[in-house]
Image: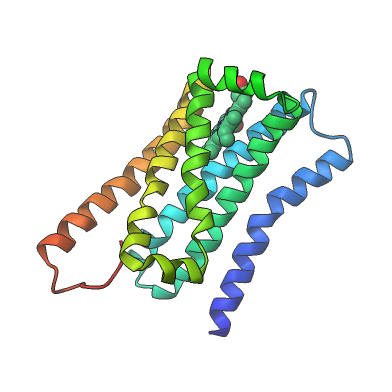
Amino acid sequence: MKEIGFAKLVVFVNSIVPLLLLGWDGLRGDLGANPLEFVTHTTGTLTLVFLLISLAVTPLRKTLGQPWMIKLRRMTGLFAFFYGCLHLMTYLWFDKFFNIAEIGRDTIKRPFITLGMASFFLMLPLALTSTNKMVKRLGGRRWNRLHRLVYLAAIAGVIHYWMLVKADTRIPLAFGAVLAVLLIYRALAAFFKRRLPAQEPSENL
Ligand code: HEM
């Protein structure tokens, strides 16, 4: 039990460090020639990284045979949402100055913004239902079904990134490749679970 607490602390500290570094750079006025771009890119990348980490927890815990790792999934997912909120706030506040009409126009006219918004709003119900109380209220089965939205959020996030990159698409494609592996894992796990129900009746994928 103590070890899980320590693992959670390690993950928490590592997850908060990028924010501290960003804040530190901001305080020192060291955000480069275009601070808005720097903050947007950093928070966007962190959102995607944490989404993929949260998706990797289950395959890792199963392949490594470390069931306690499931305890890290909620935290990494919430960090994805947290960095997503910062990313969205950067756009709404410092890019659009909360000009609702302009934000609406941008969302309709620029497909990469539409997909970013879609990805964010797919994460919202997951964050809102992340508490133990909500898991109980929804019931495990419905909760699991709802939380499959995380895959759609990640797909939308990767396409959002791929669409906004002008020339060198290697990094968004690398994110896409990691996501593809995680999706294939999930599809195979679901397939085998259906074929061998007696072996793993109650485990979530
Ligand atoms: C909430 C709605 C969102 C809006 C309005 C939005 C908007 C933006 C904008 C304006 C940029 C910079 C574009 C440029 O430099 O030309 C950007 C970059 C990015 N966004 Fe989003 N985004 C949203 C949600 C998301 C989400 C949910 C994710 C991840 C799942 C994400 C991942 C990224 C990434 C990875 C980048 C590029 C980072 C880089 O270039 O290093 N965004 N976003």
Report the front residue among 134 and 183.
134
Residue 131 locus on image (x, y percent): 52, 66
Q: Describe residue 103's horizontal placement relative to residue 23 as left or right.
A: left
- Give the residue at x 60% y 63%: 11
Q: Is residue 70 above or below residue 4?
A: above
Q: Describe residue 177's horizontal placement relative to residue 3 as left or right.
A: left
- Which residue lies most toward the bottom here? 1
Q: How many marks?
A: 0
- Give the residue at x 16% y 55%: 191
Q: Locate the C terminus by quadrant.
A: bottom left
Residue 88 visible to an observer of this rendering: yes
Q: Is residue 139 above or below residue 21?
A: below
- Model colouring: rainbow
- Give the residue at x 23% y 57%: 189
Residue 107 locus on image (x, y percent): 55, 22
Residue 198 locus on image (x, y percent): 13, 74
- Which residue lies most toward the right here? 28
Report the front residue among 72 and 150.
150
Report the front residue among 154 and 6.
154
Residue 77 locus on image (x, y percent): 52, 55
- Give the residue at x 44% y 75%: 68
Q: Quadrant of ligand 1?
A: top right
Q: Describe residue 114's horizontal placement relative to residue 32 as left or right.
A: left
Residue 171 visible to an observer of this rendering: no
